[in-house]
Amino acid sequence: MKPEELARQKIDKQISNAGWNIVGRSEYLPGYSQSVREFLMSGNKESDYLFFIDDKAIAVLEAKREENQLGDDVAVQAEWYASNPLKWCKPWFPNQIPLVYLANGRKLLFKSVLEPDSEYKELKKMHSPKEMLRIIGAESEYGKLPAISSVGLRDCQYDALTEFEARLRKGDRKFLAILATGAGKTYLACLMVYRQLNYTNTKRVLFLVDRNNLGKQATTEFSTFNRTENGLELSKIYDIKRLRKNSDLDTSHYEDKEMVVVSTVQKLYSFMTGQILSDENEDEEDEKSIDLSDTAGAAIELGDNLKLPRDYFQLIIVDECHRSIYGKWRNVLEYFNQAKIVGLTATPTDEAYAFFDNNVIEKYTYEESVVDGVNVPYDVFITKTEVTEHGGTIHKGESYFEMSKYTGEGEFKESAERFDYRPSSLNKGITASNQIDTIITQYRESIYSEMYPERKADWRYIPKTLIFAANDAHATEILYSCERVFASKFPEGKVPEGFVQKITYSSGDSDTLIQQFRSSKNFRIAITVTLVSTGTDIKPLEVVMFMADVKSSVLYQQMKGRGCRTISDSLLREVTPNADTKSRFILFDAVGVTASDKTIPIGRKQGLKKLSLEQLLEHLSHKELTDDNLLLLNDYCSSINQRYDNNDMLRYHIVEFLESFGFLPRSIAAAITEAFDKKTIPDYVVNGDNEERFNLISRLMMNIDARKKLLELRAGYNVKASTEDSVIHAGFDTEVVKSHIENFEKYLNDHADDIEALRIIYNSGLDITMSMLEDLKSKLLAESPSYSIPRIWGWYRIVDTSNSVGDPGTEVSCLTNLIQIVRYAYKQNSKLVSLSKYANSRFNLYAGQAQNMLTKEQIQLMKIISEYVAFSGIMTMKDFRVVDLDVWRQLIQLFQNPANADKEINRLSGFILKAV
């Protein structure tokens, strides 16, 4: 490299490290802060580097070789450039580029020509765009933004951030980033937020989370984020506030305050409207709000006396935006109409696309994340029982336990007649404990026989399992069932303490429980309703079991996503000692969730906020007898009465209501309906007596017991039956797998002649090189993200009925497994086994024949090379020069002639790659 080139290389690094993109004249992009090489100046001369912010020249840099001392002659040359820009090249000051730099790769000098008679100063590092603007006393909306370094970022994060800032410059205000679970959405948000706070006029950012649980995690991630100019954590630069109580936000003199606020939309709404915030039981709040119908209710009303001004936030990032941005909460976001809004999600809905004007800045799918190794694929294990498929019966005279969901109290009853219930009633009013035991027993028996047959059957360390239940009571029943079913596998006749636990709002600190499930060897089965359904990473998780159906497509995808995270083999073994690797997770479907119809929730038109029955009765008791409140009570009473009229088993509750209070809920509804239909009801008078209106409902409102019973009827009852159950089917979903295999094998046959590796294997050849296998691997993944080596191998294992498919173990991803897969698909091999397992015995055969031709040192070296061949295919001297320089040097030393070395590698490869 010439001295000039060496100096330029060092200078380029100094400029890049300061946050500048270095481009050629033909690569210049308007609107960006850039350093342009060899920019044309007056007199047809070229400056070495000309720096632009907001398309105006701000600095010139003259570069010399290291030996140059950067004397007066260099300064004169650079300052002439600064004073002689071309007419069409706009500088920051009339006919004057204000900043001048001199550099030789070793020394960097700087001068501002805006300061008369100033001397050059030596700098330790190049000025950033932000620093240059500060020096000349100028402002720019986006000019301070330095170039984005891709170091430490996934491609999807880098692309999303780059596109976000590009579209900001264009004036866009809404942005949607679709990133698969595990792709680093929160880290991306942290980087977005830091760059906006540090380099633009943004002062306050709202990070809107789906649940309080995720708000805690996000607050920690923002606080500890340290990809900053000086490596300081973000919490040491800006206030990071999680909104939990009213005192967390001080809105006085807010204009200069810089902060990040993390909140749920519900808490933000409550704060804005002056309500008292409480974080006493955030887990319960989370579990009640996770149902997507929570966002699809009548739109909330903000009112006029709000505690936050419209310009309080300049940037809003909505995590899990498929839930929070439509339906009844939309008005909260649209109130801050001056803020830019970024949506983050792995599962976008049509509503999300519409809200963000289809302005997608990145789309990184689950399938792509599997190919990239960010996530693992999954297989479906289906269990069907008599009760889950056909329902069950509570016979006449049979005992069952009935519990009020409102009071939590219950008692044993005897059925007065036969009652048949449908599968859809399971865990939605009917709990069949034998059905739960049957499913858990089937799961227990399948763990080491079908799901993980390669593992030692150590019951202390079954795969980490997350079970989704219908509600907290159902979760409790599943907990007891797991304790019963797994007890026989332990010497003491009971499961170890902490082996199975609930993570629901009633279980204590969910954060602590989730952390224990993530890291403890003893905690093997977690049962949740929704607290672990979105945004919670549990990397060692290997089984996701559904014991409650999920109708929402979005929520289902989020729940599935809990199992997809990758984990290193060593970290996996820390919590699951009998595991080798996590190449997939298993979705255990006990209720037909994989086959049931899914819906996308649609936001309703704006309307009045709907009160719960408990809230409504309180309002009515204070004689807030508006039309809306009376009509809402009408709806409640009608639906409650109808529900029990149509339920043979629980109808007696409505009869008892009549016997106890002398009227039925539908009588209240009928009185209200008649008054409105006949228009006999007088107008509502605010703060008036409204006696005629009150008379319509006085029978209910003047009887506290009747109101309590109505609330109990509204909450419903849970019946625990002892219906016998049995498994009618259990196993992997082979039909789906077979279709995958058929498509894969069709691709192999269609391309047997035009892909070199396939052509050689098809013709039973052995001379398959590493580059051929890499080419085949990339072509397969280009055809389908599912055509990864672990995935295809797993498919063949699932449909194998003759024990012909072996366990590849930790070497499942090695390139030579592609040879074996293709041979098996082409029916050349009757068994599918990994070549790497036979590498040692194959090498011994080779060594026995080669011992009279090779030295001891050469055979030892070929032993090392045999491991490379077994993993990657035939390698050449050229390959080793890139992959392992030490092996390449030894080959040169021991074989002298590269051709001889390649010849011997090929001979060895013939032994290693021979069909097993």
Image: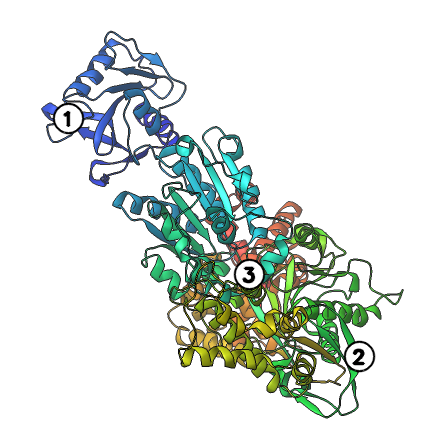
User: Residue at label 3?
Assistant: 622
Distance between the Cα atoms at labels 1 and 2?
94 Å
User: Residue at label 1?
Assistant: 41
Quadrant into which the C terminus falls: bottom right
User: Residue at label 2?
Assistant: 412
Q: Position of residue 677 (x, y in %)?
A: 41, 80
For the point 32% across and 23% down, the residue is 134
Mark toward the start of the polypeptide (1 vs 3): 1
Work out whether 854 lies above or below 651.
above
- Report the front residue among 357 and 74: 357
Mark toward the start of the polypeptide (3 vs 2): 2
Mark 1 residue crowding within 10 angstroms, few (<14) / some (14–19) / many (20+): some
Distance between the Cα atoms at labels 1 and 3?
81 Å
Inspect this view and state whether residue 63 appears: no
Mark toward the start of the polypeptide (1 vs 2): 1
For the point 29% across and 49% down, the residue is 172
Amino acid under label 1?
Answer: Met
